[in-house]
Image (tube, rainbow, N blue to C red):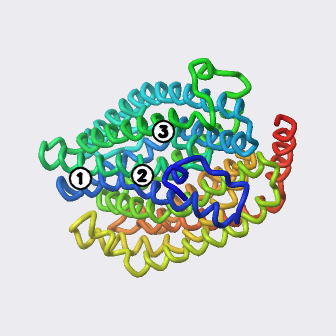
Amino acid sequence: MNLRKLFSARDMTEGAPWKRIAEFAIPMLIGNLAQQLYNTADSIVVGKYIGDNALAAVGTCMPILNLLLAIFVGVATGAGIVISQHFGAGNREALSRAIGNCITLAAIASAATMVVGTVLARPLLRLLDTPASVFDWCAEYLIIFFLGSAGFTFYNILSGILRGMGDSLSALGFLLIATALNIGLDIWFVADFGLGVPGVALATIIAQAISAVLCFIKLLHMRNVFDLKWSLLALRKDAAWRIVKLGVPSGITQGIMSVAMLVVQSLTNSMGEVVMACNVIIMRVDGFAMMPNMTFGQAMSVYAGQNVGAGRLDRVDKGLRQGMSMAVGVSASITVVLLLFGHLLFDLFTDTPALIDLAVRMMRILAVGYICIAVTQVLGGIMRGSGDTVTPMWITMVTTVCLRIPVAYGLAYLTRTEQYPNGQPVALFTSLLISWSMGALISYLVFRRGKWRTKATQIAEFSANDR
């Protein structure tokens, strides 16, 4: 395979399913790991150069960022599904129209996020009872991030378009460049210029903007696959509605998860700054551990979307079996690594022994849950790629809102001690493990009912008539 073909759109409707999934997933996994390095680099730099309070400040911002950025996550997810289905069907006109509408929707989502995020940053921090010692740092970080959120929005949506056409390698290359730049700027702004927590936010938005520009340049060089001209940027009711219809449930899913995290973050904050910092460290390592699962979920969504668009439902079933085997195998390996070597990872964030010991104990609770997440992500990816984005949404609602939040607060009440008058940190992570386990069970039971297959059949028939 020559270099040009390697960095091009890829048809996933032919060849061995496991090979097509792996070819797509491996670059995407590396890219997702690089994406995670954005926030992790922020945490390591502020933890080492400023202190544990700054580490807690950056971590406290994450649930708020995830909540207010859910709008473009939804658009990006809907874009990837629609693009993969049109690409699989070989419909150039519909593909071109969808890409143009995705770009316009990205611009609208960017503007909305910039305004709403900046206005709500401080009120949300107050709502979370953010300690005064880190409040200003949190507010400065959030406001800078939201003012520069266009790069983050456009990168995710434009890379979603590339991935929908099977090109996960180009997005990887651009992200690696941006990640290296982000880490370099983090150290430069904090260590050399003394900009503190705002410095890492500034470094992040600069790097994200560059990755977005690179993605757009790549799309401009793919005229052999689709057309990109001004007239196609005009919103078309049918094209835009289909993207939004598929994307809104995914955006709501992200929003539900973020709201749940905010509610639990309030509980975390009540346990003190040590537990806040511990939660940040756990979530950073968790972000890396979760990446393979998220990657397989996204890969299965694109794989299913292309094959449903092409009417190859037999390949969807075969890909499910092979994709599930790979995802579970990788997750089991990660679980072993975390149990054996987790303490080495936590050493990167802090030099405080008590904080490292607490993080190790909490990670032992979570580790096995990553296998459950593998099952949930693969099944959810197939459902979304088949056009059923609503089912994963309500599963998330049940497991996070109806299950995790009550369990977390209930366990916190039952574990109150003199040292932890508002509950012990074990409540936070045990509730998360229970939520993940139930999510896998519910996903399996619902998947077997086959609503996704009905949707897939309808889309396959529509695509066949439209070709």
Q: Which image quarter holds the N terminus?
A: bottom right
**Mark 2: which amino acid?**
Gln
Q: Residue drawn at (20%, 59%), measured in percent from left and top?
A: 48
Q: Secondary structure at mark 2?
A: helix
The residue furthest front is 2
Name the spot of residue 81 as percent of width and height, x first.
67, 43
What residue would you read off at disc 1? 46
Mark 3 falls on what kind of element?
A: helix
| Occupied quadrant, residue 407 | bottom right
- Please tell me how crowded label 1 is: few (under 14), some (14-19), or many (20+) other residues with Cα within 10 Å: many
**Label of residue 390 in the image:** none
The amino acid beneath tag 3 is: Lys
Judging depth in this view, the residue of 280 and 24 nearest the camera is 24
Q: Earlier in the sequence, mark 1 or mark 3?
A: 1
How many residues crowd mark 3 within 10 Å: few (<14), some (14–19), many (20+)? some
Q: Amino acid at mark 1?
A: Val
User: Mark 2 against mark 3, which lies toward the viewer?
Assistant: 3
Nearer to us in this view, 266 or 244: 244
Q: Nearer the viewer, mark 2 or mark 1?
A: 2
State the CA–CA distance, disc 2 to disc 1: 18 Å
Q: Residue at x 70, y 60 (%)?
A: 379
Contact? badges 2 and 1 (CB < 8 Å) = no
- 131 above or below 158? below
Asked if 465 appears above or below 12 in the picture, the reply is above
Give 360 or 238, whichever is nearer the viewer: 238
Q: Decide: is 320 above or below 108.
A: below
Residue 35: which disc? 2
Are the residues at dot 1 and dot 3 in contact (C-beta closer than 8 Å)?
no
How far apart are the alpha carbons under marks 2 and 3?
19 Å
> Is 417 or 263 nearer to us in this picture?
263
Report the residue marked by disc 3: 218
| Between discs 2 and 1, the one toward the N terminus | 2
